[in-house]
Each structure stands twice: as C-alpha cells, then as structure tokens.
Amino acid sequence: MTLWARFRSWAAASLRRSRMETEMNTELRFHLEAYSEELVRRGMPPKEAMRRARLEFGGIEKAKEGCRDARGANFFESLLQDLRYGLRMLRKAPTFATIAILTLALGIGATTAMFSIINAVLLRPLAYRQPDKLYLIREGISEMAQFYPSFPANLSGFLRWQSQCRSFEQIAIVEPAGRILTAAGESQEIHGGRASANLFDVLGVQPQLGRSFLADEDHPGNDHVVILTDSFWRDRFHADPSLIGRSITLDGEADVVVGILPPTFRFPKAAQLGPLTDFAPQLDFFKPLGLDPAKFSLLGEFDYAAIARLKPGVSPQQALAELNIIQAQIVRDAKENVDLHAELWPLETQVVGPARRGLLLLLGGVAAMLLIVCANLAGLLLARIPNRLRESAIRTTLGASRSRLVRQMLTESILLSVFGGLLGIGLAYLSLHQLVRWGPIDLPRLDEVRLDTRVLGFAFLLSTMTGIVFGTLPAWRVTRTEPHHALKSGAITATESRRTRRLRESLIGFEVGASTLLLIVAGLLVMSLVRLLAVDKGFLAECALTIDVTLPPQTYTTALQKKSFYQSALRQVEQLPCVSHAGWISKLPFEGQEEVNSILASGRVTDPLRAPIASFRFVTPDYFQAAGIPLRQGRFTAESDAQQHVALISQSVADKVWPGENPIGKQFHQGGDDRPLTEIIGVVGDIRSVALDQPPLLMVYVQTGDVTNDWSGSHASLVVRTRSEPLALANALRGAIRSVDSTVPIVHLRQMTEVVAESVAVRRFQMSLVVLFAVLALGLAAIGIYGVLAYSVEQRRQELGLRRALGAQVSDLRWMILRQGMVPVALGLLAGVAASLLAGSLIRSLLYGVTASDPFTIASVALVVLSIALMACYLPARRTMNLDPMVALRYE
Amino acid sequence: MDKPLDLLQGTLDLLILKAVSLGPLHGYGVLLRIQQISKDRLEIQQGSLYPALYRLEHQGWITSEWGESENNRKAKYYRLTAAGKRRLQTEAEKWNQMTEVIAGILGTKPEEV
C-alpha cells in the first residue's frame, strides 16, 4: 500500500511536473501570506511584514528543492545531468571511448546475431498449434534393430491406429512426392508430399487462402486437388490470388489449386522426421494420398511420416502402450512372428534437437567473448581510476552521496555500452544477412532468422547489463577510496593502489582463462573436421562432376524409355573430350538412403527379417571408375551383363555374409526367396554412403537395365570423371544431356567435392564461428594484457627510474614487468585448460576422431596463448629499456 | 520567555504526524499548532517544514487535498492516513521509551552506580 502510494507520488511528481510546481508555489505563497498577515495583525507594517516572513522562512528555493527530492521528482533531472556529464567525459577521452564502443559493438553484435539465430531455431515455437502435443509415430522391429532401429510408419498400421487408438485426437500421414509441373510449354520438377486429408488439422495450420483438404478427397478419384506452399506460390505464380480454383498440370494431370499455405508454414525436414524418410529440403505442394484400401498389405511398405496429436491429459507413455497393443494385434493378424513395436518421438525435439547442442555451444562461445570484452573494459576503467579519484574526492567533500557517485559512474559505463549496443545491432543485422546466406541449409529454420522485437529487447537488455557488469567494479573501487587520501596525495599521479593492481591482474587471468577455453573448443572442432575430411571416403571426389536429372513421367513411362535415355546420354557424355569415365547411379553418396533390402544368401535357410540389410544402388558399368571406387575382387559389370542377374557388393557385405569365403559366383535373393537369384561378380571397396562421420553401410550395386530388378527410377545422377579441370566441362555436359532430350530438367550440376563439402557444411559452419569467436577472444585478451602492463609501466615510471638510478639492470626491470604480466597469464591458462577438461563431456557429441582431452590440441593452444601473451607483455616491458633514470625521476 | 529549543534531529516528522492527527491542517497551520501546543518553546525552521510534509506524503503517512482557508483562500490541507496513524503510534512509543531511558541515565546519582 505505502509502496504503491510512494510510486504514485513519484510518478505524479515526475510526470506532472509543472502541475506539482504550481501547486508547490501556491502552497508556499499561502504560507508566506498567512504569516505576514499574522505579523501585520501584531502591528508590523505590511511591507516589512512580507520581508520578515520571507526571511524567517529561510531559503525558498532550497525548500522547493527539498520537496522535489522528497518526491523523487529529481530522478530524471539528475539522470540527465549524469548523461550530460558522461558524454562530456567520453568526449574528453575519445581514444578510450572509441576502443570501448568498438569492442562493445563487437561483443554485443556477435551475441545478438547468435541470439537471433537461436531465437529462430530454438526458441520460436513451430508455427503449429500446441506443437508440444505433436508426436511422430515410428515403427521398429527388434529383429532388424541392428541395421535399422526404426522405420517410418506403415499404411495399414496407420489405418488401425486411426480407428482404434483413443490416445490421439487425430493421426496424419505424409509421404514424399515429386511431380513435373507443366506450364506454358515448360516443365519443372517440383517436390512435395502426399498427405492424409487431415494433415493440416493435425498440425493446426490454416491456409492463408482457400481451404484445407476435405475428408472425401482422401479417396481415389476425388484427389485431383493440390495445396501450394507460400514460397512456391510466390516464386512460380507471382502470388496470384486468382490461382485458387484454377487448375495446374502436374504429371500431365489437371489438379485444382484449393489452398495456399501461410508463409510461416514449415514442414519438418527429412532428417528431422527420422531415418529412411526422404522429403525434399524445400516443399512446393501437398496432395491428398488418394488412399486405396485394396492396396494395403499388413507389414507392407514402411514409407510414411506419421504425425499424431496427443489428446489433452494423455501422457505419451499411455499413448505408446496403447499403440503397442495394436502393433501386437497387427503381427498376429499378419501371422508373423516378429516383435513389431511403435515409437513416439516428440516433433519439437526432432526439429530443433540436433541443432541445439551446436547452437548452445556457439552461444556459450559468444558469451565468453562478451565477458572478455567486459573484463577488458573494466580493466581500462580501472586504469583510469587515478584520474577519477581526485574528481570523486572533491565531489564527495562537496556533499555528493556515495550512491550518487556510483550512479554517475554507472551511467557513464551504461552510456558506453548502449552506444556499443546500437553499433552492435547494426553489426548483427549485417552479419545475419551473411550468416543466413552462408549458413548450411540443414540448420533448421535458418531462413526465419531476423531481428524481431524479442531480439532487439535482448540486445538492449544485454547492453545495459554489460554496462553494469564492467562498470560496477571500477565504480566500487573509486567510491571506496577515502576522499582525504586522494586529496592529500594531491599528486596528479595518485599511484595505483596494490588492491587495484590485484584486481587488474585477476582480470587478465580471467581473460586468458576464457580465451584458452574457447580456443581449446575451437581447436577440437578444427581437429574433428580435419580428421573427418581425411577419412577414407572410399571414392575419389576430386576431378569428378555429377549431374542430377529427373525424367518427366508423362514422356518416360516405361523402364525401356528411361533406360534408353540414360544410355544415349551416357554415350553423348563419353564422347566429350577430357571425360575418362562416366556412369549413372540411382543415388549419390551422402544424399540419403533409397532402396533398402535384405540379402538372403542362397543355399542357406535365413529368416528374411534377420537377414543382413543392405542399401541397393543401381549403376551403369563405368560408375565405379568414374567415382573412383576400387575393385577388390572379381570384375566390373559389362554391357553384356545387361540380361543377367548380376551385382557387385561392397567389401563389408562380403565380410558379413560370406566371411572367409570367396563371394565371387555366390548367389542371393534380394528381399524375399520368391525373388530371382542374383549372382555376385565382383567386390568393391566400402564407401561412406550416409555421412562422413558414419561407418560404411552394406552396399549392393545392381546394373541398371537388369531385367530382374524393378528399378524404374526417374531420378538418377551421372558421375563423370574428367582428365582436366572439371568445371570447364560443365557447359559441354549440359549440352550433351540437352541434345538427348531438352525437356529433361537438370536439377544440379556439381563437383563431387561439393557433394562432400555439403555433407560437412553444418560442422564447418559451427567450427568457423567458434574459431572466429576464439580468435577474437584471444585478440581481446592480448589487448587487455597489453593495456594493463603498458599502463603499469607508465604508472611506475618514477619507481622504475629510481630502481635504475640505484643500479638495477634493464634486464631485471624487464623481467619484473614480464613476471607481473605472466603470472596471471599462467594461472588463467591453467584454469582455462581445467575448464576445458570439465566442459569436454558437453561437446563430446560434436567431436569426431578426437577426445576432449586431446593433448596435442591442448598443448598447441597453450603454446599459442603463451606466445601471444608473452608478446603482449614484452612490448610494454621493452619500454623499460628506453627509460632514462633522470627523465623518469623528473617526470613528477 | 526562554529561548526556544532547537528541534532534535528526526523529531520534526513525529511532531507533524501528531499535529495533523488532531485534525486536517495546512502547512502554516501545522507550524501554528506545534507552536501552540509547545507553548512556543520549540523553534521550527519554516523552510524545513515543507520538505518534511512532502516526504511524509510520499511515504503515504499523510495525504493532502486542496480546500479553503479561514480567510477564503486556496490552501492545501494535510490529513493523517491509516498507515500514518499506526506509524505515529509506534514512533510515539519509541520516543517515550527513549526519553525514559535517557532520563533514567541522566538522573543517575553517583551512589546509585
């Protein structure tokens, strides 16, 4: 109550200042008049009475000031005063102000930029309704867990869950889909999904135009409708609202556009939906599934991303238990004997989870840098203390209270940090632009990074906090000094007290420690990337080009048509000069999984579900030479094998399925024993096919056009090994493909090295930023050390001169200064190494081929830190050399 | 008449609270009432009265409103709030204890020690 009254009176006084002034005047005038009337009544002449009344009242202005103070109405006044004073002080020390503002801008800018990324990626919820209620349903078969711990969902499972499971409000499924859009004679491949009609209800997303799918559009025949994403609608149809209700041609069929999704809509990326899911990075459209129940088979294809919304009050454990009861029933109905179970993955964790650790690491790095900036500035301000002592002493003796002095000094440091912050926001804005352009595409929601109000609020808060953090220490030191002490010593060079020096030395130690920690983390990440890139990929990425093509389905309907395109294109390419080998493959390394099937060795009784599972790729004979995959045993395929059922296997298949035997000539069934036998004609080297940091998978290469396989792929990549600079061949390659069929869109033309680089892009991104922060931190720490020592030499000029005069050698003095700097450096270094060992477990998942306590990294970082620190100490120490004792003594 | 006593540090607030507890008063009235009750034995700096009034109002122990004075002029009247009443009570108790203790100390004779 009283607090409220106080605030009200303060607010009234501050906000309605003029009214308060008039009221105060009226009140005081009333007092004076009443008193003078009283005096008149006592017989005093009126003129004299008024004078007397004023006299007895005392200072009217002083009384008014007292009233204003009592109300706190002076708060803004004195703030303005402090601000003006602070600005004047900064103008008087422009070098200090510039250095301070620039380092602050760097620190605050970098932190703000990182925060805005984290804001977009981690903090801003998915643009779905109640995203914490959304779960992915995945399926697992224990017998296959050694190869594939979990699968996407299966269609018949979905139908059972939907009708029987009471734990979910609704369940939706989506499968990836590609279409060729034909408009105005041009065709273009577009990517999207085929979804159950309830998908957008489950996600809680309303189209910005038009409507969602209707329930009966799930049935075949009613499914000629399509919903477009906002970005595709903008890019391809110039955001034309009249598109709703019109039809577009997809794969030669007319589909009516019924809705446009809002710009905020994002569909989770394939990797976030779990292994074996294959959505394109950018989706253009959604179509209904067109469910045909006749086509369902129990335990059929596991291809679908299933997204379910949990009912309120139901726990995920309950839901999972219910799903697993249904799963067991499915297995019984299918008359199988496997352990089929369901898994529930929280969608939100899936979307942001993998990026979280890396981003938090970056935020930690940038925060450490900001702390070093603070320590540096605190050091600089501490160095300026002697200049301030006299001033503050005078102000204290004149009656300024200590809190007033602290407030004034804090106003100065906050002023600095707010200037730095403003500059920093500009810096963050510019660098964000670069980051988003430069950042790898896998970082989820990177495209949504922007400076919004939350980020600006953060930057503002950060600036203020920074000012308080680095300003408090010096302010506290200044006001703790006894005023008479400072005035008595009277000298302009009131020497730095031992305690202030101790403080400055601990700041050095802190800066060195923090930058050591950052450098070690950066070093470990660099080592990881180096080791990763040095890993034997199993193929040669240099001097190789790849072209990804997609065949328009309306012209390429049969396997024969596709085969003839692939063959003619290959013939055209092979004729180009400088091409040594060229070969098609159904999916490039690092580009995900496709055909996954079990290998059933002939002549053995193997349960299909327990058989080894391999990744199948379809290739043309020269693929291996083009990709630089070595032949270990047997022979490559030849054109003459086209009618035979032959395949090459990777070394690990040979080791796994036929250990200790010669696999050449062995036969196996692919998938089930009802399928024809395939004969092994060769063994090739293992390759890292999923990601550089994952061990090779079992691979089987089948020749395309092999009559036994049903590869009807419309997507394929051509790998071309060149004898000269690969990019010089790019145009000739495009031309060769066009000359076969100009309607076939070329999706990508890249060097193989780019394919590899893209696979480590996230890692490289993280590493570059941490290295950048660490180098900046070290630079700042070096400046800090230099500043402290240079200042100390300056302060101790007289003492050093005296020592010289008394016979101290220059080398002694230099050693003394060096020791003063290097002792805190050494302590900081030790602390930094210790901290990095403790932090090791936090970053373990980001490392590859190197442990957090890697002695080589730690030793090199220690060496770098020591040499930089030594240099920063040596420069000021060298000044003692030029010290003329006489000059130094006279300096006073 | 004896020379009026200077006010002890910190007692002005207590006196003001007591004065307005007897009925709403304007600033000048507070001065007059204190002088009247103390029979002119206390000297109050008129200039220090107003900051004290503003401070007490800021702390919520008194409130003010504009009214008419005896000779029909606009004047600001101060009144004790409920919080002020409690404050006055505790402050008065403290004061009484204090004077008792101090009087006891000052009244001590050598043989009593």
Image: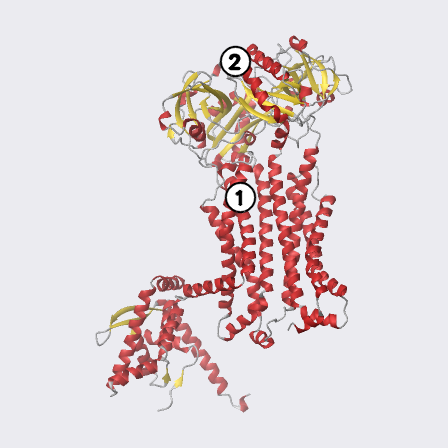
Q: Is residue A539 above or below residue B55?
A: above
In-image side of B87 versus A809 (left or right):
left
Percent across and percent down for residue A161 are 50, 25
Q: Amino acid at mark 2?
A: Tyr
Q: Amino acid at mark 1?
A: Ser
A129, A361: nearer the viewer = A361
Percent across and percent down for residue A415 are 49, 59
Quadrant assignment for the N terminus of chain B: bottom left
Could you give the CA–CA distance between mark 2 and mark 1, rounded to whole angstroms?
46 Å
Specify whether residue A886 is in view: yes
* Mark 2 or mark 1: whose residue is earlier in sequence: 1
A784, B14: nearer the viewer = A784
Count residues near mark 2 (Cα–Cα under 10 Å), then give few for <14, some for 14-19, many for 20+. Answer: some
* Same chain letter for marks 2 and 1: yes
Structure colour scheme = secondary structure
Helix, strand or loop at label 2? It is loop
Residue designated by label 1: A431
Helix, strand or loop at label 1? It is helix
Residue designated by label 2: A556
Quadrant assignment for the C terminus of chain B: bottom right
Please name the residue shown 56% across and 56% down the image: A99
